[in-house]
Amino acid sequence: MHSLLVLGVAGGKRMRGLQDAAQRHGDVVLHCVDYADAMRDPTALHAMAATGMALKIDSPGDDAWVQHQLCLRGWEAGSGMAEKPMPDNVVSGGKGSDDITHDCTAASPTISTTVLPPKPVAKGELMPTRDWYAGFAQFLRAIPQTAAPLSPVEDILLMTDKLNCQQHLRSHGVAIPPLLGAVSGYGHLLALLDQAGVDNAFIKPRYGSSAAGVVAYRRNRRGNELAVSTVHSANGQHFNAKRMRRYTNTQEIAALIDTLAADQAYAEAWIPKPRTQGGGYDFRVVTLDGEPQHRVARVNNAPMTNLHLDAQRAQAEDLLNDVALQALVDTARAAARTFPRSRMMGLDIVVRGERAWVLEANAFGDLLPRLHWQGRDTYDAQLHALFPKHVQRNQDQQIPAPQHPILPVAPSQVQPRPTPAASS
């Protein structure tokens, strides 16, 4: 029997998916540690990691207590972010991107630190992501690194720092949407748009996921503006919601952008998504050991196509011809190979004609229930990649799976045709 240490959310969809896969595999014992338990007392987590067993670090989820504890850790550590400046605003989308290039380094925002400790946030409320990221980094880096990780901590952190990650991909020649750079506020955003000569852009929190806090922004020559976002504001509080809100009032749009920018945000040019029945679409591709495997088109009438925002699934092969499909696969492979130590990652990619751009890389991009590749879901595929020898033995010798293989430890237990694009 093999052992796999899993840091995740006890009882969550991700953990359940792995447990189901372990049962099907039949030769893997999962040792599941819940984030909340490990944050109260990391002794068991550290002890198991130090044994050198394989380790899968999963998303900490959206539990309000866990989020607040991570924010507090980051704030207590001096926010860490004060030592981590925003990258310079030099734009270019990398190989294959539109040639929008200018230097707006002088307009880079300054970094401020939070004087007061972060307050607890309600579920769904925007949290201070700089503090959260600093706390998340501190927590993960304390885990003994003797374990064999599915994805190394530093790769997870790089993929969670969305702006640095895009710059990382670009520096390796992977096509991304042209970066307009860090945004210090609404006025600065307009200046960046003017410099780049574009009127459509996505504004994204530097540290984030699942389209939380993302704004799809448009303007025209008549001075009209439109911002679409998952963020709903009321009484000075800002919440993420599944239902997207449209903002057309300049004062409200400026307040929204200023709020996001205060916690670090960046802008990138909006690449129009091709359209099919049901709306515009992009793709989520899961790579394993550098090779693209699971892939699904995400179709939505809204600018954001995240599946949890009610986007519909479609088959990539139904939407792309052979050339476009090859561009999707080649781009996913090129992006994955810039993280040679990460065995699994999820990539959001938009394809237009023969060109493809990586919208985001996701360290936790494998939550795709019922999506199969060569007969395996994403969790089956990861376990079989980690423990291939026993897979072959089970297939060849028809060894029955154990009745109770899971020993949790310490759980608390179409037809295509072109909508401008956001990713998850």
Image (tube, helix red, strand yellow):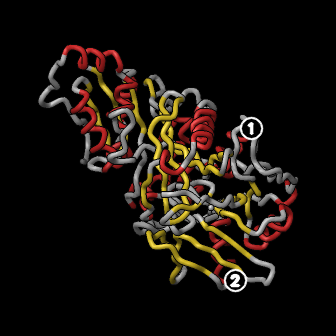
Q: Which residue is mark 1?
A: 171
Q: Please report the residue visible at 40 percent of the width from the left and 53 percent of the height from the top.
A: 61
| Amino acid type of the residue that numbered disc 2 sits on in the rendered structure | Thr
| Residues at marks 1 and 2, CA–CA distance in whole angstroms | 35 Å
Residue 42 vertical position relative to residue 216 in the rendered view, above or below: above
**Closest to the observer: 121 or 358?**
358
**Closest to the observer: 354 or 117?**
354
In the rendered structure, the answer to whether residue 329 lies left or right of residue 91 reads left
Q: Which residue is mark 2?
A: 250
Secondary structure of the residue carrying tag 2 is: helix
Q: Examine the image and state in which quarter residue 33 appears.
A: top left
Q: Please report the residue visible at 72 percent of the width from the left and 34 percent of the height from the top.
A: 172
Q: Is residue 349 visible?
A: yes
In the rendered structure, the answer to whether residue 66 lies left or right of residue 405 reads right
In the rendered structure, the answer to whether residue 8 lies left or right of residue 240 reads left
Percent x, y of residue 150: 45, 30
Q: Please report the residue visible at 58 percent of the width from the left and 64 percent of the height from the top.
A: 214
Percent x, y of residue 404: 14, 31
Residue 323 vertical position relative to residue 279 in the rendered view, above or below: above
Q: Please report the residue visible at 43 percent of the width from the left and 67 percent of the height from the top.
A: 124
